[in-house]
Image (cartoon, rainbow, N blue to C red):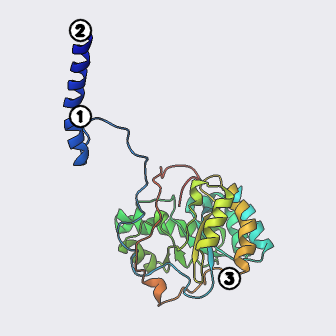
Amino acid sequence: MGRFRALRATAVLTLVLAVPLGGAYLIGRPLLPHASPPDHTPSATASPVPAGVLMTTGSAHVALTFNDGPDPTWTPLVLKTLRQYHVKATFCLLGRNAEAYPELVRTIVADGHTLCNHTWNEDLDLGSRPRQDIESNLLRTSQAIHAAAPQAPIPYFRQPGGNWTPQLVAVAESLGMTGLHWAVDPRDWEEPPAAAIVATVSHRTGPDSIVLLHDGGGDRLNTATALATLLPDLLSRFQLEALPIDPPETGQTRAPSAPPQQVGQPQDTAAGPGTGSR
């Protein structure tokens, strides 16, 4: 009898607990603590990229772009492969890296690639800062690039993480630079396998695509490896060119209709040369 009473008490207690928990589940408010869901980095921007920012080439040509260099390990490997296939690209340089590795800046320019200002220290929140701070950051970066290659044009500015604001676009334009976004992002800053980078870029790239890749900001061996397979594939279908020194003034490339689908990655902006995401 004692065992029966114990079993009945357990059953009643289970039922009592199940009722509020079940009701809470139905309304989406669990009462018991649970593990947090996997962290998903928020989208780069909550609103469409501002007008005035390039998202496509505006032609049938495809443009490869590389962020976060120059890097003494990975940039030479990327340049070597681009040279092998006679491909010109666009390099978005961090000011601190340009200052640290001026010889690489000169090599990029000597190889005929286009330059892009990518802020001094990959400041993801630059767009929220006062105009004077934005201008100071961009000027400092361009000055570091020009200290290495005085005559090289810097026609583009790319905001890290794609965290654009109208003020960023306006300041860049006042300094003679056009905002540069992208259409294809294999998220190689997360260091996926080379085969995954190849598959994403190969399948998503079409005429007029701007492709986002990295030659700095982390271990870029997989990106450098992917290029050896990716370049012949893209060249069989498209003409690959560096973005022009004189950016297009009109067209769909300056009027994006949808917010970016990719994400920014928070980081410590005080990190040393070569650390970063987009």
Q: Say which residue appears at 47% left-offset and 78% top-offset.
A: 175
- Mark 2 Cα within 10 Å, few/some/many (few <14, many 20+)? few
Q: CA distance from mark 1 to mark 2?
A: 24 Å
- Look at mark 1 in the image and give the residue it sits on: 18
Tag 1: residue type?
Ala
Q: Say which residue appears at 40% left-offset and 72% top-offset.
A: 259
Tag 2: residue type?
Gly
Name the quadrant of the N terminus. top left
Judge depth for marks 1 and 2 and give the one in front.
2
148 or 91, which lies in front? 91
Residue 54 place in picture, x, y as percent: 49, 79
* Res 72 visible: no
Q: Which mark is residue 2?
A: 2
Dot 3 or dot 2: first in sequence order is: 2
- Look at mark 3 in the image and give the residue it sits on: 238
Judge depth for marks 3 and 2 and give the one in front.
2
Residue 5 placement: quadrant: top left
190 or 153, which lies in front? 190
Whether 224 is drawn above or below 1: the answer is below
Outermost residue, bottom side: 250
Tag 3: residue type?
Phe
